[in-house]
Amino acid sequence: MQWTRMKEEVLAAGGCRVRGRLPDHAIADSTAGPGASGSGAVFFSNGKGRVRLPVTDEGPITLLARPDRRALLEYAGQVIAGEVEPVGLHCPRQAFITVTPACRFRCRYCTVPAQEERRRSIEECLALVEGVRDRVEAIALTSGIAESVEEEEDYVCDVVRALGRFGLPIGVSIFPAPDTPRRLHALGVVEVKFNLETATPDLFERYCPGLPYDRVLGALASSVPLFGRGHVFSNVIIGLGETWTELADCIDLLVGMGVVPVLRPLNPVAECRDCERPGPDLLDRAARHLKAKLQEAGFDGSGAVTMCAACTGCDIAPWRDL
């Protein structure tokens, strides 16, 4: 089984059993994203691609691990050799911090509002990066919304200023206020990710009540001239009821703006716990459509240095997996 199909099957299955002994710094905990509030995950690499493997007690996928990092990924009678990668915070090679791991909004696919954790202080953020400094090459920040979009932006900007002392590239993914792209760019942030999340405005209204879809679209459009094509990103969740045409149109829209879509398979949690994960065939079709559009446009995410497009563990990334 080729790497691409194996990864598509793994993402569709949603987890793996671990056998053997994991190396140091192998388990990643998440306070945001697909694995928020989960039991942890490991990252497996075949030398080119990377996949995030949520750790479960059952399922068709098995990771045979060794303390020297070498590992075998077994699925459907097929085996791929590779290694378990050490993580910084949340993912390999990055200190990925959720500044406020709670949110006053209630997006239906997200578990962050249920966590009700307090905001991290600037001192805590500094300590987190310091603790993994020897194994990270970048910093990534995301955040819920404690009080308001504007207040959260102000606080994240303060965190960015403080983290500048490490001299590492910083990427930021928050819900944007009108001036967010300009403010982040002025602070030296190198990449941004503002998430449309859904393929259509109607789905956004249904799944993200109280948040303005047009605000995200406007922030993406104004970010491209500042950060450059290939350094502005937007999550698009696959599996929220969109048609294929709607998904393809959303991909085309974003690429046409100079934005790299991050195609994220739905994790059935929160109010979507009864939904089905998108199957491997749909993930493959979407990724190949994205690859074709990026090739036509003349850019992709291969130059990303922060956040999801640099990691690619949770998604089929055409510039690495196809």
Image (cartoon, rainbow, N blue to C red):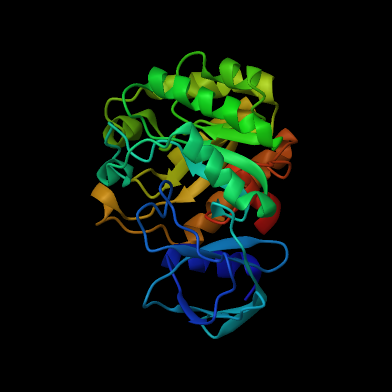
Residue drawn 49% across the image and 23% down it: 217
Give residue 177's position: percent from left, percent from top: 45, 18
Is residue 311 left or right of 319 when viewed as pictured?
Answer: left
Residue 133 in view of the camera: yes
Tell me the quarter of the picture where residue 135 sits. bottom right
Residue 297 or residue 96, whichever sits in front:
96
The vertical placement of 280 against 157, above or below, is: below
- The quadrant of the image that shows the C terminus is bottom right
Q: Residue at x 33, y 45 (%)?
A: 241
Quadrant location, the N terminus: bottom right
* 217 lies above or below 65: above
Query: Residue 240's x, y, as percent?
Result: 35, 46
Q: Residue at x 47, y 14 (%)?
A: 178
Relative to 226, is 95 on the left or the right? Answer: left
Residue in the picture at 37% in, 28% down: 201
Q: Is residue 322 visible?
A: no
Viewer-proximal residue among 149 and 14: 149
Front residue of 253 and 175: 175
Which sits in the foreground, 263 or 286?
Answer: 263
| Residue 214 image position (x, y, % from top left) | 42, 20
